[in-house]
Amino acid sequence: MADLISVLRRHGIRATPQRLAVAAHVLSAKSHPTADEVWRQVRRRCPTLSRATVYNTLNMLAEKGLIRPQVLREGTVVFDPRTDRHHHFIDVETGRVYDVPWSAIRVSGKEKLRDFDVQEYQVVLRGRRRRP
């Protein structure tokens, strides 16, 4: 927890108990949770936590570059604890989002988009995950 407090302070975020609980959950998430999913999970340990605090904390973490908001599910923002470059695969049966290494997919033709200044891109794949 001391490490998390240091990380928040380094990014200019005051480490309140509520912010610590939200940050601990989302930064250690193995999934790509929505704000409501974060609220439901963290509220189990912190019953007085409000939705507004969760939304404000998630937005603050995103502003500071600690998480990335993504629209990967129709009309829903999810929060990605991985801020490095990577792609996503969405299982259409389960809705689960998987991280795909950046090097696994090559995108060509960006230079042909003369009317656009491409600053960032990512590939979102949809399908069914094969079961071993």
Image (cartoon, rainbow, N blue to C red):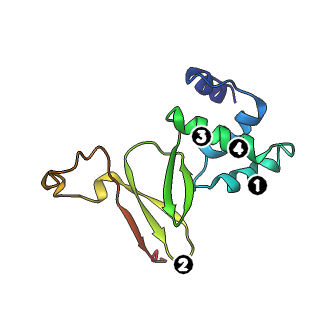
Q: Nearer the viewer, mark 1 or mark 4?
A: 4
Return the mark for residue 59: 3
- For mark 1, what is the residue? 40
Badge 3 amino acid: Asn
Q: Are marks 3 and 4 in contact (CB under 8 Å)?
A: no
- For mark 2, what is the residue? 93
Q: Position of residue 130 (x, y in %)?
A: 45, 77
Badge 2 amino acid: Glu
How far separated are the C-alphas under marks 4 and 2?
Answer: 28 Å
Return the mark for residue 114: none
How far separated are the C-alphas under marks 3 and 4?
Answer: 8 Å
Q: Nearer the viewer, mark 3 or mark 1?
A: 3
Badge 4 amino acid: Val
Q: Closer to the camera, 129 or 16?
A: 16
Other residues around mark 1 within 10 Å, as few (<14) / some (14–19) / many (≥20) = some
Q: Position of residue 13 (x, y in %)?
A: 63, 25
